[in-house]
Image (cartoon, rainbow, N blue to C red):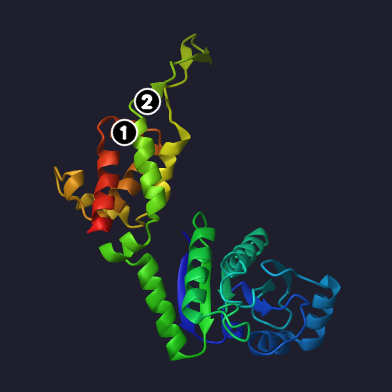
């Protein structure tokens, strides 16, 4: 997962490979963050580059050179104007961050700096803007090492961003439980109740070694695709290797905390990547199902 930082600094002052401009669809110079980026990148050069592109839809992003900025590139991401939340604003805002990170990755960037898109003159409520921004960045950098910076200019915005970050990604049981989509949880419970056994393929001869011995494929489980939904319920525990060492011996699933369940699910998921049969064992002994039922109980209580 990429690392996320919230800092009190102008976005043009960030020491990153790429900065993000809160742009408009015409890619025209504006005020606020947009104005600062045009001024410091070199107004004429950046205006010419943007005019050559001409247009960018809301929810999308385009890239130019960073010109006079320390950053090599500028991504121009067009956020939605707030219209009360009934005009697909959240999806469009999420898409801005997703597209910006994708462009940065495609161009070899290892770090990127964002303003809080749409939260200025576009009127997006600040708390909700933080929630979309942090979720989008977290999910878009899940399999990368991208460093992501959010640049804000005042203490109030810094504090609000940190509060939202803690509520989304904090390690407390309350924060973990708040992150769970209960409808997905119930779907996973239903799927696991339906799955009673795992089907295994037999070993097959794939060829011969130089000394004439058979080369066999190892047996591997064929899992119903629904089972992998279990590992999308919670964000992974990125400290699971340390946490699993301190896991109490003989702890029953019915006695686990939300944090312990998250650690165990991460452990099982990571183990399965090495084909060690973790999921098969956990389905057969019923512990996966018991952990999900325990989460449902914790949410109820």
Dot 2 or dot 1, earlier in sequence:
2
**Residue at left 36%, top 30%?**
195
Quickly name the residue at label 2: 198
Give residue 71's quadrant in the image.
bottom right
Q: Check residue 283 in the rendering and tell me which mark sits there, or answer none.
A: 1
- Nearer to us in this view, 186 or 227: 186
Element carrying mark 2: loop
- Nearer to us in this view, 169 or 193: 193
212 with respect to 58 (left or right): left
Q: CA distance from mark 2 to mark 1?
A: 8 Å
The C terminus - image quarter: bottom left
Establish if 251 lies above or below 104.
above
289 with respect to 12 (left or right): left
Q: Position of residue 38 (x, y in %)?
A: 72, 86
- Marks 2,1: beta carbons within 8 A: yes
**Residue at left 47%, top 35%?**
225
Establish if 202 lies above or below 56.
above
């Amino acid at each position: 997962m990429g690392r996320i930082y919230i800092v009190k600094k102008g976005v043009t002052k960030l020491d990153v490979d790429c900065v993000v401009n809160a742009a408009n669809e015409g890619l025209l110079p504006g005020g606020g963050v947009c104005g600062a980026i045009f001024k410091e990148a070199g107004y004429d050069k950046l205006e010419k580059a943007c005019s050559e592109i001409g247009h960018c839809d809301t929810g999308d992003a385009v890239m130019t050179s960073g010109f006079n900025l320390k950053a090599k590139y500028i991504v121009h991401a067009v956020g939605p104007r707030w219209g009360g939340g009934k005009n697909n604003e959240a999806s469009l805002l999420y898409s801005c961050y997703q597209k910006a990170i994708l462009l940065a990755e495609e161009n070899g960037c290892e770090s990127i700096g964002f303003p809080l898109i749409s939260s200025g003159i576009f009127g997006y409520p600040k708390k909700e803007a933080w929630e979309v921004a942090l979720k989008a960045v977290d999910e878009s950098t899940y399999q990368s090492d991208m460093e992501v910076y959010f640049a804000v200019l005042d203490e109030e915005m810094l504090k609000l961003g940190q509060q939202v970050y803690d509520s989304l990604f904090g390690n407390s049981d309350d924060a973990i439980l708040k992150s769970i989509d209960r409808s997905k949880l119930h779907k996973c419970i239903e799927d696991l109740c339906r799955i009673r056994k795992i089907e295994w393929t037999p070993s097959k001869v794939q060829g011969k070694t130089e000394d004439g011995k058979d080369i066999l494929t190892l047996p591997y489980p064929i899992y119903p695709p629904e089972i992998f939904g279990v590992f999308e319920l919670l964000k992974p525990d990125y400290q699971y290797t340390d946490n699993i060492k301190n896991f109490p011996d003989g702890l029953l699933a019915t006695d686990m905390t939300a944090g312990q369940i998250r650690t165990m699910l991460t452990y099982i998921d990571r183990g399965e990547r090495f084909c060690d049969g973790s999921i098969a064992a956990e389905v057969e002994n019923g512990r996966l199902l018991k952990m999900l039922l325990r989460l449902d109980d914790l949410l109820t209580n």
